[in-house]
Image (tube, grey):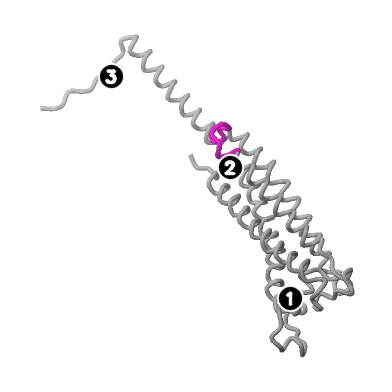
Amino acid sequence: MFNLRIPLLVLVGLSIAFSICIIGTASHTLAVYNSQRDSNPWWMPLWPDHFDTNGTKSLIGSAVAVVLFDAIYLVVYLVPTFDTPSRPTFNALVALATALPCAIVTLATLVYAHILNHNAPATDTLQTWTCAFRSSSTAVDQLDVSSSVSNQQFTQLCHESKFALYGTLVVFLFQGFVMAGAVVNWGLEKWGSHKEKKNGKVLGDQGSDNVHMVGMGVYETKPPHAA
């Protein structure tokens, strides 16, 4: 019987993979900022309030939530105790119960990060600042100086920040596909189960009729072959 269980597992696996990458890239960006903000002049140590890191932190938090919820779905699906292959309704409910919170969290994070990014230049996020000044240079930067006192890492940080943001959008879409797929798969499995029961009932009725005819002494005879 055709179903969407494998595609759903693939989507959940991709969602976890993207979320782990988001955690890694956003955490690295935040770690670089935290380690350099008091010493690197490109991070304007005299104006620390100019930067808003809440967007980066929210991206990390939403990715962690997605990993946890998707891991719950995988555990429920793969552990034989739950017997999800023979329980389509339960499987669909678990998929919806894990994907819906992920979709809500990622959507809220996207909106929040988008709002913070549009506050620039009044206040900058790590993404808007690094992307704006990744190509800038000063006379000091022409010298062989450490990246901890220059903007040498800004290009990488800009790309990492963008990946974390747009990767969250991809994860949101994955969660939407999982919810839609869970509903469609539930319908397919219910329809297939109903069809199998109906076919089994028809075969059972035919078998009963044959037994009844044999009991009455009615047999099928074949005409003799012509010589």
Q: Which image quadrant for residue 170?
A: bottom right
Find residue 220 and name its label: 3
Q: Which residues are magenta?
A: 76-86
- SS for callout 3: loop
Front of the two marks 3 and 2: 2
Local crowd size for mark 3, using a 10 Å CA cut-off: few (<14), some (14–19), many (≥20)? few
Task: Report whether 48 appears left or right of 206.
Answer: right
Front of the two marks 1 and 2: 1
Asked whether residue 155 is in view, the answer is yes
Report the residue at 78% width, 57% height from top: 58
Question: In this picture, is 98 found above or below 63?
Answer: above
Circle 3/circle 2 CB separation < 8 Å: no
Front of the two marks 3 and 1: 1
Of residue 6 and residue 184, the one placed in the foreground of this image is 6
Determine which residue is flagged by label 1: 148
The x and y percentages for residue 148 are 74, 75
The x and y percentages for residue 137 are 75, 86
Judge whether residue 182 is colored magenta: no
Determine which residue is flagged by label 2: 185
